[in-house]
Image (cartoon, rainbow, N blue to C red):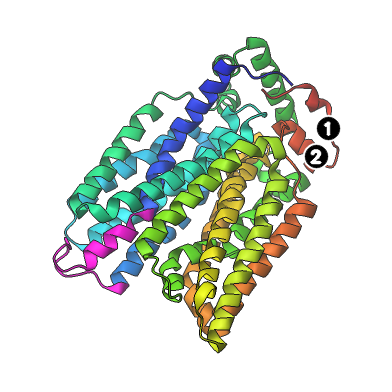
Amino acid sequence: MYKLHFGPLLRQYFIVITVNLSVLVTGLGLAWPSPVFVKLRNSTETILPSPMTEEQGSWIVSIGFLTGLSQHLVAAYLVDRIGRKSCIIISCLPKILVGFLYIFASEVWMLLLGRAILGISDIYAFNTVPMYASEIASKEIRGALGTILQILCSIGVVLMMCIGPFVSYLHLNIIYTCFALIVTVPMLFLPDSPYFLYSRGKNQEALRVLTYLRGSESIASDELKEYSLCEKQTVAKRELFKNRTFLKSLFIVLVLSGGTQLVGFNSISFYLQTILESTHTSVQPELASVITGIIQLLSSLCTTLVTDKFGRKPILTTTLAAMVFGLMGLGIFFKLKETIAISGLLNFLPIASVILVVIGYSAGLGSLVWVLSAELFEDSSRGIGIGISSLFSSICVFLTTKYFAQLTSVIGSAETYWLFSFNSFLLCAFVLFYVPETKGKSFAEIQSVLRGKGKSETANFCRS
């Protein structure tokens, strides 16, 4: 292990923050329906021939999930074929097109087309940015740099929630398009992933990039030796699904990715207004959305500061425990509401519970699953592994958000939240007993742990 100097540290942070600006625009897009739908339903503000219907709104929200499903494995292929940087640029350019489409939109089909394109674009961002960040980062700060994705996405959501209600539809989409244009330009000047360059036989270019990132040619050379050693142990892609180490990594990441959706956070986010309307507090839904976004942002920032000090597992287990109690509190509130008149401090139980769930999710699963997804696969299988896990995650998020309302009507609101609480408990136990700690380990050392060999000869090569 070597001591990180300020110059290389600053360069790594700058590059990773820059590449995650693409995710900031994704955050803007994810929150876009909230302020825009209010305008589209208003007969005086809508840009449509008539106010938007609930059916049209549901399709505008969901079509991106459907189009995105088709791109996970394509992105997994392209990220190893044309490179991480090229895929990130591919994720940025359509957002500019969509911005102009929104500006000139006058029919529902134009909004649907824009959301469909964004769904595809976002898949390239979420599949590629965590991978790129993990391959740029030194192992000592890889966790912190990996959590920047959640921070920038949260900033995008908060910005849209703060700006959207107070400007016109046209001005809001001009602002969105300007963001998309501004963040795309610096992507063109970023270095490509040193591992990708090495995998394409561009050893000297990989050495140059690593020397720039690590601040030392000798450290960069050691890292290239680790790449070489890992490459000797690499399994051909057609043999991956016979390889026990890859299957173990894939199983862990699938459970984490699917579990991230099955704890119900997205359902709570999308139905936050319904939850608040069940209380007799004066908290406005618009204000609550902004506050929730700020809490997400601050929680993610805290994780960035501590993940490389305390490790992934302690943070995940602690935050999942918080989600267990928060979701249990929501269930208790709705069960009491069925039998007694809620008054006084009990009205604040769901608000406190939601805050606990938001903190737990944002500081834990929301930030660290991206980190672990990039860390647990070896270099050559990272693209396909992340592609499969993100496809599974998208299916889970579609099912949980699509059928949340039906589930609550069949088994009840209280029982639904208790089910999510139980899922959080199971996921907490899984992390505690099955997920390896990756803090401070090189990719080669992580693979050795997964193979059950502890630290191997690859430990001699410290990934800087």
In the depicted view, which residue is nearer to us: 121 or 428? 428
Magenta range: 31-54
Q: Real-space Cα distance between discs 1 and 2?
A: 7 Å
Residue 455, disc: 1
State whether residue 418 is above or below residue 115. below
Tell me the element at label 1: loop
Describe residue 397's horizontal placement relative to residue 104 as left or right.
Answer: right
Q: For the view shown, which residue lies furthest in the front direction?
A: 344
Tell me the element at label 2: helix
In the depicted view, which residue is nearer to us: 5 or 389? 5
Q: Residues within 10 Å of mark 1 (few under 14, many from 20)?
A: some
Please give the name of the residue rendered at 33% of the width and 59% of the height, measured from the top-left corner: 33
Residue 50 painted magenta: yes
- Report x, y in % for residue 215: 59, 14
- Report x, y in % for residue 85: 46, 31
Mark 2, residue position: 449
- Report x, y in % for residue 332: 61, 76
Residue 233 painted magenta: no
| Quadrant of the drawing holding the C terminus | top right
| Quadrant of the drawing holding the N terminus | top right
Callout 1 touching callout 2 (CB < 8 Å)? yes
State whether residue 335 is above or below residue 139. below
